[in-house]
Image (cartoon, grey):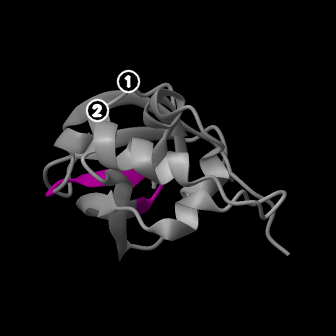
């Protein structure tokens, strides 16, 4: 999972991070405080494990397949080598573009984060 704020801060194509879900209207760096909590979207609940360590795959442009090592250097220098989130499904459910998102400490919704699903970062199939 990634947020538009952190992607904008990185200044690179979101596809380099390969998130399954992209959350919009979220401030840069907000996701760094979320590990240990969960995200409720529709009837789904997604656990937030940790900020994700990035690897050399981020240097490959998904459109051209050309390599730009500066992307990973920047992630290491400015993001401590980590960006986006490692997650798991706690409770499966349907997620749709436009669904509101809530950060939760338990199975109850407790804190509105201002986010919403803005779409898949790349086409599947």
101 w.r.t. 76: above or below: above
Residue at x 45%, y 59% (from the top left corner): 43
Q: Residues within 10 Å of mark 2 (few under 14, many from 20)?
A: few
Q: Are marks 2 and 1 in contact (CB under 8 Å)?
A: yes
Q: State the residue at coordinates (18%, 40%).
A: 33
List the residue tagged with mark 2. 30
Give residue 74's quadrant in the image. Answer: top left
For label 1, the residue is 27
In this orientation, which residue lies closer to the viewer: 125 or 114? 125
Residue neighbourhood size for the residue with mark 1, other residues' Cα within 10 Å, grouped as few (<14), some (14–19), many (≥20): some
Q: Quick check: is 58 in the magenta stretch?
A: no
Which residue is more in the foreground, 56 or 83?
Answer: 56
**Residue sitting at 35 percent across and 73 percent down?**
88
- Residue 109 in view of the camera: no
Q: Secondary structure at mark 1?
A: loop
Residue at 49% across, 68% down: 56
Q: Specify the segment rendered in magenta.
A: 36-44
């Amino acid at each position: 999972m990634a947020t538009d704020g952190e992607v904008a801060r990185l200044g690179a194509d979101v596809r380099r991070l390969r998130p399954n879900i992209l959350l919009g209207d979220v401030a840069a760096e907000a996701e760094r405080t979320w590990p240990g909590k969960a995200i409720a979207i529709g009837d789904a609940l997604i656990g937030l494990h940790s900020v994700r360590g990035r690897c050399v795959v981020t240097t490959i442009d998904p459109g051209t397949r050309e390599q730009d090592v500066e992307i990973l250097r920047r992630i290491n220098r400015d993001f401590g080598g980590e960006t986006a989130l490692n997650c798991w499904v706690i409770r499966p459910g349907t997620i749709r573009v436009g669904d509101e998102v809530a950060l939760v400490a338990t199975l109850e919704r407790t804190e509105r984060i201002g986010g919403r699903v803005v779409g898949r970062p790349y086409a599947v199939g």
